[in-house]
Structure formats: C-alpha cells, structure tokens
Image (spheres, rainbow, N blue to C red):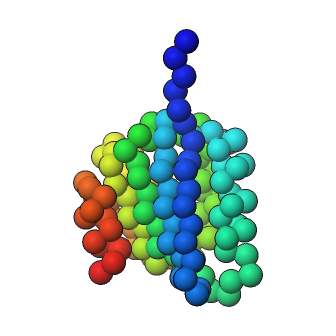
Amino acid sequence: MKFKRHGLSIGIERIGDRFFLYLKAQGKLTHRDYEMITPMIDSALAGVKNPQINALIDGTELEGWEARAAWDDFRLGLKHGGEFEKIAIYGNKKWQDILAKVGSWFISGEVRCFDSESDAIAWMNS
C-alpha cells in the first residue's frame, strides 16, 4: 500500500514585532490540516500589537485543497490578512498564480510568484 503525504509544515520566527512565516504545502490540503496549523499561527501572533509578517510559501508539492480546507484558508486570510507585508510563493506554477490572485484579495501586503526559492527570498529581503 502506498501512502501519499499531505499537509502543511510551518516555521515561525519572531524578532520584536516582525514575523517570518515559512509554509510548505504538500499533497491535497484538508480541513484537518488547517485545524492543526491555524492554532499555531494564532498562538504565535497572540499578544503582539500590529504584527508585521513576511511569508514564504513552498508550493512545489501542492496538489490542491478539499473544499472545506479552501474555506479554512479563506478564513485564515480574513483573520490575519492585514498583518502581512510580503508573501512570496514559489514552486508550482499551476497553483501559485491561483494562490497569489486569491490571496491578494484578502492580504494587505504584496503577493508575488517566483520560479525559485532563491528569487523569492531575495525579493522578501529587498
């Protein structure tokens, strides 16, 4: 029997009120994935007045979302969208353009797509 990995891996670093968020999406995301990841993001941002977030999203292994997971992603964007300065998405042309377009509706900062991680990081640091 073959198992297919799916889910979200997350890394969060904080320096003062600035956050760096790294997300790696694998497979087809589910509601359960968001049930696990959302409290981590909420907890990291709790108690910080006006957090500033830069996010790097690795979509090299993203295959999509279940309908309920897409709704969870939408709600997460509404809740924290005003806190993002830059979001860099790379690695999966099929999904990154969709992520960028939808994300830009709910995110106050810039959302851009890149072919490589190094280009994405260079833009975030500019």
Can residue 24 be seen at all in this image of the molecule? yes
Identity of the residue furthest to the top in this view? 1
Instruction: Name the spot of residue 37 as percent of width and height, x first.
Output: 66, 54
How many marks are shown on the rendered structure? 0
- Choose between 102 and 15: the one closer to the eye: 15
Residue positioned 35% across, 74% down in the render: 124
Who is closer to the viewer here, 106 or 111? Answer: 111
Q: Quadrant of the C terminus?
A: bottom left
Residue displayed at 37% across by 44% down: 60
Query: In which image quadrant can residue 87 be found?
Result: bottom left
Which quarter of the figure has residue 120? bottom left
Measured along the vertical axis of the image, is residue 59 above or below residue 55?
above
Q: Residue at x 49, y 61 (%)?
A: 22
Asked if residue 105 can be seen in this view, the reply is no
Q: Which residue is located at x 34 percent, y 55 percent?
A: 90
Give percent across and percent down for residue 21. Answer: 51, 66
Q: Is residue 117 left or right of residue 107?
A: left
Quadrant of image for the N terminus:
top right
Could you tell me residue 15's position as x and y percent? Answer: 55, 83
The location of residue 40, given as percent across then percent down, is 68, 61
* Above-or-below relation of 109 to 74: below
